[in-house]
Image: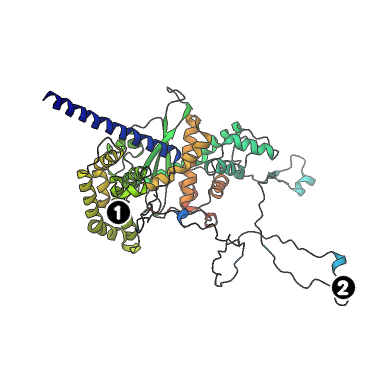
Amino acid sequence: MENAVKVAELEAEITDLKQQVQLLQEQLRLARQRQFGTSSEKSVALDGEQLSIFNEAEAEANPAAPEPELEQITYKRKKRKGKREADFSGLPVEQVVHELPEEERTCPDCGGPMHACGHEVYRRELKVIPAQFKVTEHLQTAYSCRHCEKTSDGTVPMLKSSVPAPVIRGSGMASPSLLAYIAHQKYVLALPLYRQEQEFKRLGLNLSRQTMANWMLYASTKYLQPIYDAMKAQLLAYQVLHADETLLQVLREPGKTPQSDSYMWLYRTSGDAERPIVLYDYQPDRKYRRPADFLEGWSGYLHTDGYEAYHKLQNVTVIGCFAHVRRRFAEILKTVPKHAWPESEAYRGLQFCDRLFALEREFAKLPPEENFRARYEARLKQSKPLMDAFFDWAKNSPALPKFAVGEAITYALNQRLYLEHVLLDGRLELSNNRAERSVKPFVIGRRNWMFADTVNGANASAVLYSIVETAKENGLHPFDYLQFVFQSAPGLDFHSDPAALDRLLPWNATPDLRRSETSSKALPWDVI
């Protein structure tokens, strides 16, 4: 009897040790995948299946496809098969005429001289001209009266022409275009000021990073902060918003060490907004009172990830993110051999999520005039039964809680209330990918400049990123819009003339600024 008990105890211990080994092996595979593996989350179909409905462009790439031809289209004609024409009609054209040397212009038949009788475009190239700088001198004109000059015994009356106010008071170098260029380089192209300083030196300009930083702080406070405040008021007028947050290190922050974490919060409009707005908000921590303060007085639907701080907000209905649920299953499958997928619980969970996103793609094809109402009804009819089946499967899954699949399933069950909120209104979205895409430019920039030096710098970055990202969302080229603001704002009094501020908002910008940038009206579930 005692031997049987000991054998049972040993078998239980062996089973427990095997589970621990499997758990450690799984954690090692996941760690290696996250560090060295691909970050793509696209679905890969098994043989004979049509699962891969979220492939990105790379899945359709064809290395053998020809380059776009530099062909200026001036009339309608049928495009040749296999060719893609790039529209360069807005670019200036420089022609280089190649001629035969004088001694070679001899007729091979009679030996007489030959003359040029026509030209043919042999090829078209796209030429790049690096950044060029020039000095603009503002001359003030003085006016005097010739009659008084001849007849007056006293002072001759004088008049002087008005000169536009400088964009940076006291600076004899800053211009609207220079400020817009520096801001565009850093906040759109993620080029830190110290690298811009080096590039300016190569171009023969002695422009220090300290000077550029001072200009950015001044421009943010003087001209862009009022626009930011006006956009925030407009943002809070919408009933459906998205939110996210990401890390930021501030070296000189009162009461904190340089190594401590601060945060950049993001709030943006959803797909139903006529005026897309993206706002960043710097805060020293990740406490729930930060979104509570930013959204004070606002009530509506807020798309977020699973962070609990959002769940504490008053008068706010939090909409969970199915992309986060799907991502956990997708990451696990990257560590599982493809032949073992059909037996994997992670594969079953991923299939549920992919079917939900496939339905959203179908709902997006509904007529625009009835899209939101029709989507609401279609979700109740088709998505809700699928969600119920997903959560029933999750509750009855045999996956062990400590393993990655068990943790993914537990996360989904814990978020169920917020995930099902998407069924409340047709304007809502299945994921918070819209916010994640909007926070990505800041994350990319942070990899280059790594930290903010001061709190003022962090706040200025929040304002500038808000301006350029909102400009892009409204179809504006960020450089053109920034230059427009820096040209128009000096000398204006926004307090006494609110209409002047209204004219500077991105959606009221002049039509000629609307070029090349594409708004994020694209479906947020197109790429996961």
Tell me the crowding category of disc 1: few under 14, some 14 to 19, or many 20 or more residues within 10 angstroms, Cα based. many
| Dot 1: element | helix
* x 31%, y 48%: residue: 347
Q: Is residue 201 left or right of residue 278?
A: right
Query: Can residue 282 be seen at all in this image of the molecule?
Result: no
**Is 374 rendered above or below residue 298?**
below
Q: Is residue 323 left or right of residue 487?
A: left
Residue 124 place in picture, x, y as percent: 66, 61
Q: Amino acid at mark 1?
A: Leu
Tell me the crowding category of disc 2: few under 14, some 14 to 19, or many 20 or more residues within 10 angstroms, Cα based. few
The residue at the far left in this view is 1
**Is 356 rendered above or below residue 283?**
below
Residue 253 place in picture, x, y as percent: 46, 25
Q: Is residue 278 left or right of residue 299?
A: right
| In-front residue for pair 444/171 | 444
Residue 181 place in picture, x, y as percent: 59, 44
Quarter of the rendering containing residue 376: bottom left
- The residue identified by callout 2 is 113
Indicate how the structure is coloured in the image: rainbow
**Is 37 rendered above or below residue 16?**
below
- The residue identified by callout 1 is 356
* x 56%, y 50%: residue: 480
Residue 72 place in picture, x, y as percent: 61, 65
| In-front residue for pair 163/528 | 528
Q: Amino acid at mark 2?
A: Pro
| In-front residue for pair 336/193 | 336
Real-space CA distance between mark 1 and mark 2, rounded to the nearest whole angstrom: 76 Å
| Dot 2: element | loop
